[in-house]
Amino acid sequence: MKYFALVALLQCTEGINLHHRAELSNQQKLFKIIEDGDGFSGWHAGLSGFPGTVNENGNYMQPYARALPEVFGGDAALDGQIPLDQFTKNLIANFAVEGIDKDAKDAAKIPENTGKFYLTKAKGRALAAETLCTHFSKCGKDGEAYLDDKYSAAFDYYDVNKDGRIDAIGMAAQLMRFLCQPLGWLDIQ
């Protein structure tokens, strides 16, 4: 009987350890989102509302709340306003990475957001999958097959600096139109 109680206690302890490991892996996932090989590379859309790590032990990361550029705010249906670019508004709100100013000479400087938005190759593929599904009904495997065939070459064509990102406001809509050109006209605004 003592043996069974000991085994039960060990299994219970292992269950707690597994739960703790699961929590650590979630924390590690967060750090994989905000860090890359060179350190922090920018604010991803999913990090909006991040409370920051400002405390008595130091300041590693500033709090972050995504602010869309003023031109993408409001309602274009109101009289006297210019039409609103819903595609770029969605892109910035849900897919883009906001740039940071970091000083290579000053490693202690806390990076701050710049208000400039970029589309990485991976986030661009997610945007392209959504665009194909909503505009051309190429969802799931059909859309993935199309992207497997055409996406890399299209993104590389627009990534002229070869740094793995393009300007979200200036180039992303052109990338999507170029990618979807064989399917027909892509009316995004």
Image (spheres, rainbow, N blue to C red):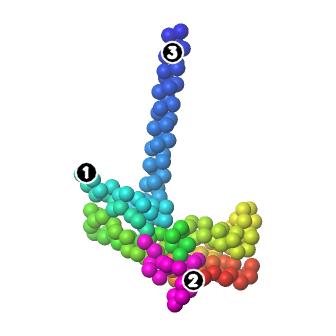
- Looking at the image, which residue is at 30% across and 64% down? 110
Q: CA distance from mark 2 to mark 3?
A: 69 Å
User: Dot 2: few (<14), some (14–19), or many (≥20) neighbours within 10 Å?
Assistant: few
Q: Position of residue 39 (x, y in %)?
A: 39, 61
Q: Residues within 10 Å of mark 1 (few under 14, many from 20)?
A: few
Q: For the residues carrying marks 2 and 3, which lies nearer the camera in this image?
A: 2
Q: Which residue is mark 1?
A: 57
Identify the residue position indicated by label 3 in the image.
Answer: 5
Tell me the tag on residue 77: 2
SS at circle 1: loop
Disc 2 element = loop
- Marks 2 and 1: which is nearer the front? 2
- The magenta segment: 67-88
Secondary structure category for the residue under label 3: helix
* Marks 1/3: CA–CA distance: 43 Å
Residue 71 part of the magenta-drawn span: yes
Counting residues from the start of the chain, the first of labels 1 and 3 encountered is 3
Query: Most prominent secondary structure in the magenta stretch?
Result: loop
Asked whether residue 172 appears in the rendered view, the answer is: no
The kind of residue on which mark 3 rests is: Ala
Left or right of residue 132, residue 121 in this image: left
Q: What's the residue type where badge 1 is placed?
A: Asn
Q: Residue at x 60, y 82 (%)?
A: 189
Residue 30 in the image, given as x and y percentages of width and height:
46, 54
At 57% from the left and 83% from the top, the residue drawn is: 77
> Which residue is outermost to the top?
1
The answer to if 70 sits in the magenta stretch is: yes
Q: Of label 2 and label 1, which has the lower sequence position? A: 1
Residue 10 lies, in percent from the top left, at: 49, 23
At 57% across and 66% down in the image, what residue appears? 122
